[in-house]
């Protein structure tokens, strides 16, 4: 059996699953802004001379959304900034994806290790005690205390914060008392809805997050709800990090409110959620290696060294004084690297760019198999996309193999399920990819599937023949088969559009294609479920999915997350609403193992996987196989490729090291300019 590592989900299960929804407007009210930009008149154009030995360090990025604190759903580009200004978590991840106690923060390491080894009976709660160092400081010199760790979890799951636009306030979701805290009242679930206890006396028993306990200034306890155990990644449930309580409460002016208290506020009353939201694009203090200095939208983020950072889990500290993360267009990013305008460019996938960088004497490169994939992501909750057969028809339209060849030029692999070729499950599976449907261009199957899905009429109600004869497809209700695609303004989208437009037209689909900025795409992708159906234009989006080492598909595909930004496809395949029964199709090009998956839905599979003990990696793999088989048929996303990620760095730097679990912001503490 493979020795399974305790793995990490970026510590976000406790501290929030992402960051925030971007507001295109400036701060809602500039007058109460408690922390004006410390550099109100910065150099608006930090273009460097050709790279010098002394820095600053320049890093290229495609773009930002401007969401640099934990607020719900930030892009990976924003998360890199966030990681640099947030640190001192009690749990860390190594470059091999191993989940470890941060011995540079935690004092009672042996006590925590002993607790990890304890297996509690089913339904029994489990408490972890964390004792932290007493000499850690925020970048403003204030002491980091246990109260900041407790506050972080409360902040990322409070009712008032959710009412201020936090898109994913689910920190501490597996801890005792989360639901009441998240809902802003004591109560219980009743048929999927939280019902407040209107008779509760909050004077005698104030609302609190029961699973969080402040022991003393530098000790706190987190209690896992026994109903959530066992869990394949138990340590992730308690992997907390600090947030600055003194800033986010304005030194005690603001506190968390119950639902009734919040709802009683006047329109002009400021509350803690609104107060914190003013810092979305300008983190006020840092616990990480760098301090936020300035953000110029669509141009750059500038960071300064944090003198109070006590190091990563190994004790390593950054040394480069200033870091500038510059927006460089994907069409010219390699030119910026080769010309010396940036030192580091990561996540390069295009073959031509890779070859040019590898040939340059002043550029060093490393690569690793991606822990993720690129694909065409569907919204499955409205219009034609409700029917998986329409999604399968699209899969048979697109010449994915040719697209991968043209786009990646030999540096990628065609895939047929939402997986990364760097995942250990993929590397050890005996069923995936062999038993997956390999979708290939076949217009006969496209027509068959669209006919079966009910899109078999022309505008006059006659049987649809072909595009030339019948025009667009309609259903029996006279609705036209309309599909909208929203892509990014990148080479990726430019190439993909060629492989979408022609086949869509031939299939009789009224197809609308648009390319826009990444922030526009993310806003439509994450939040379209909040819109009325008649106002929704897009059914599909080309994006990438980057898994972390803690792989828990429950948070991506389970129906518990319908109506949230977690289940971005708004996809449901549950026992009460199974999307399809494929068991009858065994022997007709389908492979189905009744000993493992016997018609299990995605909800059942994801629930089963996460409740396995960490020692049962073989069984985890069996259910992962079954999940991939079902996802391959239901297609909430059409996978296109997984690939090798190339990372490039100017040779004037040393210490550059990245893996699938270790990004540039993780290696920054080791980077030095060569003397």
Image (tube, rainbow, N blue to C red):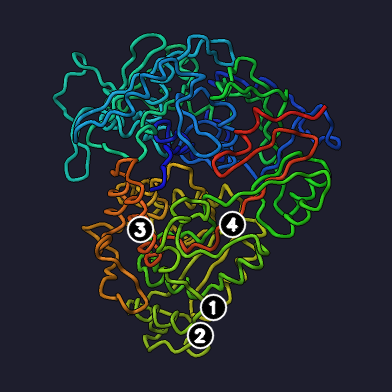
Mark 2 or 3, which is nearer the eye?
3
Front-lying residue, 149 or 527: 149
Please indicate, yes or no, whether residue 398 appears anywhere in the rendered image: yes
- Left or right: residue 655 compared with residue 540: right
Marks 1 and 3 sit apart, C-alpha to C-alpha, by 32 Å
Marked residue nearer the N-terminal end (2 or 3): 2
Marks 4 and 1 sit apart, C-alpha to C-alpha, by 30 Å
Q: Quadrant of the C terminus?
A: top right
Q: Residues within 10 Å of mark 2 (few under 14, many from 20)?
A: some
Dot 4 falls on a residue whose secondary structure is: strand
Where does label 4 land, which residue?
643
Where does label 3 land, which residue?
627
Marked residue nearer the N-terminal end (1 or 3): 1
Marks 1 and 2 sit apart, C-alpha to C-alpha, by 7 Å
Front-lying residue, 412 or 147: 412
Where does label 2 land, which residue?
467
Q: Position of residue 603 (x, y in %)?
A: 29, 53
């Amino acid at each position: 059996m493979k020795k399974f590592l305790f793995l990490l989900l970026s510590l976000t299960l406790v501290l929030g699953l992402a960051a925030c929804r971007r507001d295109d407007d400036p701060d809602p009210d500039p007058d109460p802004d408690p922390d004006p930009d410390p550099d109100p008149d910065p150099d608006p154009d930090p273009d460097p001379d050709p790279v010098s030995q002394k820095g600053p360090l320049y890093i290229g990025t495609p773009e930002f959304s401007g969401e640099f604190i934990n607020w719900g759903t930030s892009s990976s580009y924003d998360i890199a900034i966030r990681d640099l200004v947030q640190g001192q978590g009690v749990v860390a991840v190594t470059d091999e994806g191993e989940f470890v106690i941060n011995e540079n923060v935690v004092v009672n390491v042996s006590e925590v290790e002993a607790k990890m080894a304890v297996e509690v009976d089913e339904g029994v709660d489990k408490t972890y005690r964390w004792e932290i160092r007493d000499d850690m400081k925020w970048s403003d010199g204030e002491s980091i205390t246990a109260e900041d760790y407790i506050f972080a979890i409360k902040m990322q799951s409070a009712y008032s914060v959710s009412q201020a636009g936090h898109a994913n306030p689910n920190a501490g979701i597996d801890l005792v008392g989360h639901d009441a805290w998240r809902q802003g009242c004591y109560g219980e679930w009743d048929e999927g809805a939280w019902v407040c206890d209107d008779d509760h006396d909050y004077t005698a028993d104030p609302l609190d997050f029961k699973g969080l306990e402040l022991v003393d200034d530098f000790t706190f306890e987190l209690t896992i709800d026994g109903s959530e155990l066992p869990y394949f990644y138990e340590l992730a449930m308690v992997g907390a990090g600090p947030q600055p309580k003194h800033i986010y409460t304005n030194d005690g002016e603001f506190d968390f409110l119950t639902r009734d208290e919040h709802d009683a506020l006047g329109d002009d009353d400021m509350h803690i959620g609104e107060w914190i939201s003013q810092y979305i694009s300008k983190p006020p203090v840092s616990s990480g290696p760098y301090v936020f200095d300035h953000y110029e939208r669509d141009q750059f983020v500038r960071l300064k060294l944090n003198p109070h950072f006590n190091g990563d889990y190994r004790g390593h500290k950054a040394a480069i004084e200033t870091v500038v993360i510059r927006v460089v267009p994907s069409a010219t990013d390699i030119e910026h690297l080769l010309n010396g305008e940036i030192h580091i460019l990561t996540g390069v996938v295009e073959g031509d760019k890779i070859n040019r960088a590898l040939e340059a004497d002043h550029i060093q490169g490393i690569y690793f198999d991606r822990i993720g994939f690129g694909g065409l992501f569907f919204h499955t909750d409205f219009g034609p996309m409700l029917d998986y057969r329409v999604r399968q028809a699209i899969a048979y339209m697109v010449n994915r193999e040719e697209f991968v060849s043209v786009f990646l030029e030999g540096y990628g692999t065609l895939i047929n399920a939402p997986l990364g070729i760097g995942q250990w499950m993929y590397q050890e599976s005996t069923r995936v990819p062999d038993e997956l449907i390999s979708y290939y261009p076949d217009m006969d199957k496209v027509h068959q599937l669209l006919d079966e899905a009910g899109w078999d009429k022309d505008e006059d109600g006659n049987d649809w023949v072909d595009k030339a004869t019948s025009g667009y497809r309609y259903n029996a209700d006279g609705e036209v088969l309309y599909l909208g695609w929203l892509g990014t303004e990148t080479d990726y989208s430019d190439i993909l559009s060629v492989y979408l437009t022609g086949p869509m037209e031939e299939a009789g689909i009224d197809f609308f294609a648009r390319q826009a900025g990444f922030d526009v795409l993310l806003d439509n992708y994450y939040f379209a479920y909040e819109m009325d159906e008649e106002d929704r234009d897009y059914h599909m989006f080309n994006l990438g999915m980057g898994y972390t080492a803690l792989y828990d598909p429950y948070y991506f595909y389970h129906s518990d997350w319908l109506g949230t930004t977690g289940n971005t496809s708004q996809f449901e395949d549950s026992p009460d609403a199974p999307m399809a029964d494929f068991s009858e199709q065994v022997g007709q090009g389908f492979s189905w193992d009744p000993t493992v998956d016997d018609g299990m839905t995605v909800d059942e599979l994801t629930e089963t996987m996460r409740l396995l003990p960490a020692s049962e990696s073989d069984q985890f793999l069996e259910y992962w196989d079954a999940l991939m088989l079902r996802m391959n048929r239901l297609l909430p996303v059409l996978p296109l490729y997984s690939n090798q990620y190339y990372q490039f760095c100017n040779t004037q730097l040393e210490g550059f090291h990245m893996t699938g679990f270790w990004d540039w912001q993780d290696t920054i503490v080791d980077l030095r300019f060569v003397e």
